[in-house]
Amino acid sequence: MIFASARLAFADIFSAPFRGALWKALGLTAVVLVALWFGIAAIAEWFAVPFLSNLFPDVPAWVDQAGTLAGWAAGFALAILLAFLIGPISAVIASLFLDDVAEVVEANTYPEVSAGTAMPFVPGLILSVKFFGVVILGNLLALILLLVPGINIAAFFVVNGYLLGREYFEFAAMRYRTEAEAKALRGRYGTTVFLAGLLIAGFLAVPLLNIFTPLFAAALMVHLHQRVSRKEGGLIPGEATSAARMVRG
């Protein structure tokens, strides 16, 4: 069930129907990263010049050059941190398009079931912030645990596997269920969701490929939720969607 869902999700993210969400997410991520690069470089240069001017008032030309170097050094430091930043930034941006991803998966692979209900703007924005917080927290915890001998890399996968699996599965489930129902379903299939989360963590650990993590995770969990729902007796077309819509108002 898990590997079949992962295989379908990996094929999904590079398929033609996904390209709209994919390019929007990648484009916005690139814009944010470039803006961070130049913004931090400019701020570093802006602070460095007055500071160095006070220390070396007789060499203004050297101070200007040093300020420029400080700006570029800050940009270089940011480049080193991209491996850490690209995951959270792409997560919060791509989360704005997760419902688009879910709709494509549901329509193309599960046409016999009515499409789920997208979240309204405000709850969707809250979910985006939540995804950002989860990825940041997971990576910070994993970074701290990297210093503990014997568990380091395993900690990264366990922490991210649990957090990412939980959040993305509940996202997929809440397109058809209330939040309480989604959490209860995840509880009944906790091991399955965690193992699927480990696959997402593995995706996140691969440089460059990790920018696709939110789209892969959303597609994976939509597939998994649909398959789990079949084991639960199936989603009745229209009824679950209507119930979710009534709860969300």
Image (cartoon, rainbow, N blue to C red):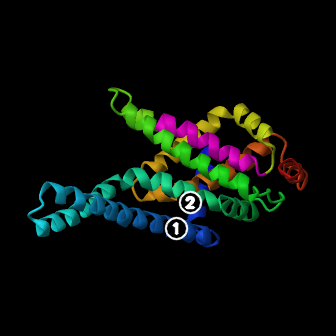
Question: Count the marks: how many?
Answer: 2
Q: Secondary structure at mark 1?
A: helix
Q: Mark 2 Cα within 10 Å, few/some/many (few <14, many 20+)?
A: many
Q: Quadrant of residue 117?
A: bottom right
Residue at 91%, 51% in the rendered image: 239
Q: Which residues are magenta?
A: 157-175
Q: Is residue 73 visible?
A: no
Majority SS type along the magenta span: helix
Q: Is residue 163 magenta?
A: yes
Q: Is the C-beta separation of discs 1 and 2 under 8 Å?
A: yes
**32 horizontally vs 224: left or right:** left
Q: Residue type at mark 2?
A: Ile
Residue nearer the viewer, 94 or 216: 94
Residue at 66%, 33% in the rendered image: 190
Q: Residue type at mark 1?
A: Leu
Percent x, y for residue 38? 36, 66
Which residue reaches farthest left? 58
Disc 1 or 2, which lies upstream in sequence? 1
The residue where tag 2 is placed is 93
How many angstroms separate mark 1 from mark 2 (CA)?
A: 7 Å
Split into 4 quadrants, where in the image is the N terminus? top right
Q: Quadrant of residue 61?
A: bottom left
Residue at 77%, 52% in the rendered image: 175
Percent x, y for residue 42? 33, 65
The label number, if any, that marks residue 2 in the structure image: none
Residue at 63%, 43% in the rendered image: 167
Residue nearer the viewer, 113 or 40: 40
Q: Secondary structure at mark 2?
A: helix
In the image, residue 24 sits, relative to residue 226, either above or below, namely below
The residue where tag 1 is placed is 28
**191 horizontally vs 239: left or right:** left
Q: Quadrant of residue 193?
A: top right
